[in-house]
Image (cartoon, coloured by chain):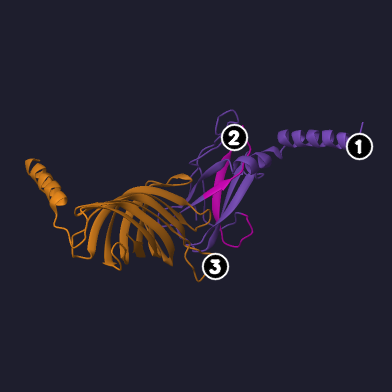
Amino acid sequence: MRHMRYILILLCFATVHARAGEGRKKVAFRIFGNLGTWMSYYRQQSPGHDVKVSSLLAPAVGATMGLRIGIILAEYSGWWGFSPYSANPKARDATYFAPLGGNLGLSLPYIPIEPYVGYEWGRYGLSSGAEPVYSKSGPKFGVNVLFPFSSKGQFGLKAEYRKFSVGEDNMGPLPSNISTQIEVFSVFLTIGM
Amino acid sequence: MPFYSNNFTLSVILLLALGVSGCGKELQCAISGDNVSGHVVFGDYMPIQKGSRIHIEASTDDFATIDGSNTVTNVHGLITVSYSLCASSDKNLTFRAFQDMNGNDLLELGELSGDHGKTEIIHSNTPTKKLTGIDIILDTP
């Protein structure tokens, strides 16, 4: 615990006095629009059964907004993933994914890569008879790769991954002997400042 | 009295009659949504047919007649599929489900089936007037 305190003090010192790039402010407001695609894996397991459903690529749109303080990023994020195309029109696989949450990451000067971790709450819909909807919160991991195109503007790619176990859907708790897990990948083109 | 007034009064009386008759549960479910919900679960090692129809039924007389029913399609061959249906309130209800292989909504020999295991009552005097967690395990080949 004592070492953690020193690490936190060092981190605070670094964020305030981080060496800025040319024209890079120590504190900057950030807002980005995101347009891209997502895909998901849904899996159920029980004795004698192992079922996997993969959702094909589908469009997604979202936004992030927050602050960069020194080298630290702190942002809110949200996006909506739409239903993917399926070869069978009646089997639309994942019907939507709608997470909201926050990110904490690193933005180092001169380096275009920004890794971050986040925590979000999301609703995930699956096409299967009565179309269950799952609500779950949990961690996610992501990375931005950004390049400037003006004195303030940046564009690039954002990639994220989250995995969560679910114990209930919109019709109530799932049977306890069934393990249900959902993984969601997303990749966005991102543009903002 | 004017013609339209007589018909308006008659319409109100008919609506009230529907509300207290056997059609009342359909009207209530049309307004508030289905009043029974849960999951159909395939038992351990029971065969799951991808794309099969799962038929769920509620009865007040041990399935001599069907009080309410619904059919869901197990599109992806999942182990558990959620469902909802509309059933009568303030009556002892039993629930069963089966994998309907020939699509005739009838439980026949060789079709995997199961029941909820106990009777339930939808109490009309409760705030939600709904039954949740009515899970049915398909474990009878």
| Residue A160 visible here | yes
Name the mark on residue B3.
Answer: 1
Q: Rounded to the nearest whole Å, what is the CA distance between mark 1 and mark 3?
A: 51 Å
Task: Give left or right: position of B136 versus B60.
Answer: left
Q: Position of residue A48 (x, y in %)?
A: 37, 58
Verify whether residue B96 appears in magenta: yes
Q: Nearer the viewer, residue A186 or B32?
A: A186
Magenta residues (range): B83-106
Reading the image, the residue beneath label 2 is B92
Q: Amino acid under label 1? A: Phe
Q: Are discs 2 and 3 both within one chain?
A: no
Reading the image, the residue beneath label 3 is A89
Please state the chain letter of the residue tagged with numbered disc 3 in the rendered image: A
For discs 1 and 3, the disc positioned in front in the rendered view: 1
Q: Nearer the viewer, residue A174 or B104?
A: A174
Q: Residues within 10 Å of mark 3 (few under 14, many from 20)?
A: few
Q: Amino acid under label 2? A: Asn
Q: Which chain is purple?
A: B
